Structures are given as C-alpha cells and as structure tokens.
Image: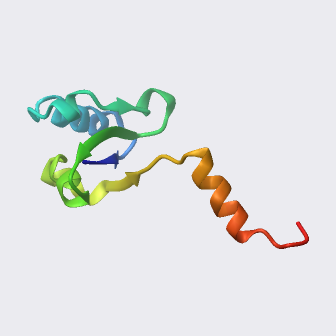
Amino acid sequence: MARFLIEVSHDPDEFTCARVVKTFLTSGSHFLTHADWGCADGDHRSWVIVDVADKKEAMAVVPPPLRPATRITGLNSFSLDYIEEVLKKHSSPSS
C-alpha cells in the first residue's frame, strides 16, 4: 500500500464550512470521520492520510461533490543513507 494525503478545501463562510464537516462526519468513511481541520485557525481545509493502492483509490474516499476541491499527494519517507547517495551523486569534485 502507498500513503496519500487527501486535502479538501472549502469556502470560509460558516454555513459552507459546517456543511462540508457534516458531509465528512456522515459519510460512513472511517477515514473521513477522523479528518483534521484547519477551520478554527482560518485555514478552511481538511486533511486525511490514507493507506491505499493509488491516487484513484484515495480520491474515491472523498464524497463526489467535494472531489473538485480535493488535492491528493503521494507521501514518502527518506532515509539518511538514500539522501547521502543522492548528494554524493550530484556533488562536484571541488565541493
């Protein structure tokens, strides 16, 4: 499985915000009922991290009316060994 960050933006007005939150909470999706929200800090987006096969499956978690305002980002981790190899590969001899 791969990891993806699902980010859903919405308009800042109180009614729209409440409607989007209700959509998440009543979706039946375990993922969506555990979303994190930035609304109380003035950032009207929600974030969910899911472990699914691909971006298409990640988007399927989002209720259809909210998909146009959704961004899916594949997540990865790096090891220090990997980064050292990349830096070594791109270092000039005079560095």
Residue 92 at x, y percent in the picture: 82, 73
For the point 41% across and 40% down, the residue is 44
Q: Is residue 51 above or below residue 91?
A: above
- Residue 14 in which image quadrant: top left
For residue 95, side relative to residue 14 (left or right): right
Counting labels gives: 0
For the point 44% across and 50% down, the residue is 76
Residue 16 at x, y percent in the picture: 28, 40
Of residue 68 and residue 13, the one placed in the foreground of this image is: 68
Of residue 42 and residue 83, the one placed in the foreground of this image is: 83
Residue 64 at x, y percent in the picture: 14, 53
- Residue 24 in which image quadrant: top left
Outermost residue toward the left in this view? 28
Of residue 14 and residue 92, the one placed in the foreground of this image is: 92
- Residue 93 in which image quadrant: bottom right
For residue 35, side relative to residue 75 (left or right): left
For the point 36% across and 30% down, the residue is 36
